[in-house]
Image (cartoon, rainbow, N blue to C red):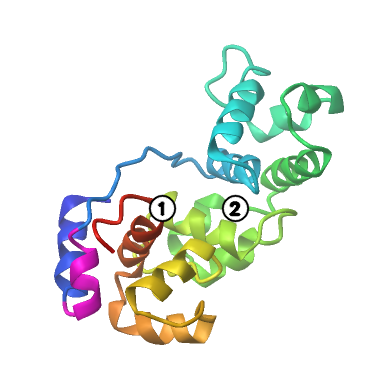
Amino acid sequence: MKKKAMEAAHKHLRKDLRMRKVLKLKLEARSRPTEPFQSLVRSIIYQQISGKAAAAITKKFLALFPGEKFPTPAQVLKLKDAQFKQAGISPQKRGYLRDLALRFTDGTIEPHKFSKMTDEEIREHLIRVKGIGRWTADMFLMFTLNRPDVLPTGDLAIQKGFQKVFGLRKLPGVKKMEKIAKAWSPHRTVASLYLWRVIDGDDGGW
């Protein structure tokens, strides 16, 4: 995220007294794919396994395409079952990746239209693909398209972040989180980054 956008988000979020302390934490800079197909392939591979295991599988997957920085949808469709297995990709995820590649090649997914679509329109667009739900779509909006006002309420760490920062007795539901975060708009993506930081990193005393 650009420096000016981050500064604007901080200025806005500091109005929330509970968030002021959270904003003192340091965010870890991470490099993520910005090309839609590449980003969604990564999301599918990373589902429900550790980051270390997913990184190893991704490396093996890319090794199936020597000389290529990243395969095209057409190249993925040409892979045989044995090649997916060689890379450590499960049969279920193999099906997801093939469906993703097919929908990019047949025009079901139209990334060139994303710039003119709302966040919700993009979510609906993406969940047509097998294996892509609202959580994956939210991650895509936040980290690939850099949309500024995404609140991934389906993410467990986000729920735990709300619980910890706001002293809730139990994990909050969607309506509760949206009510608390209403005042954060249009900077809920940055707020979410800090809620993750509270739970997943050195919490700085929380």
Q: Pick the residue in front: 26 or 148.
A: 26
Give SS at disc 2: loop
Residue 192 visible in the current orientation = yes
Quadrant location, the C terminus: bottom left
Confirm whether residue 118 shows in the render.
no
Point 45% across, 63% down: residue: 116
Q: Which range of residues does the magenta coloring cover?
A: 15-24
Q: Residue at x 50, y 56 (%)?
A: 139
Classify mark 1: helix, strand or loop. helix
Indicate yes or no whether the magenta region holds residue 18.
yes
Disc 2 crowd, CA 10 A, few/some/many (<14, 14-19, 20+): some
What residue sits right under mark 1 in the picture?
A: 200
The spot of residue 36 in percent (x, y) is 53, 45
Residue 167, magenta (yes or no) = no
Say what amino acid the circle numbered 2 marks: Glu
Can you tell which mark lies on residue 163?
none
Question: Residue 120: percent from the left, percent from the top?
Answer: 53, 71
Residue at x-position 72% and y-position 53%: 131
- Left or right: 67, with 84 as reference point: left
Q: Name the residue carrying label 2.
A: 110
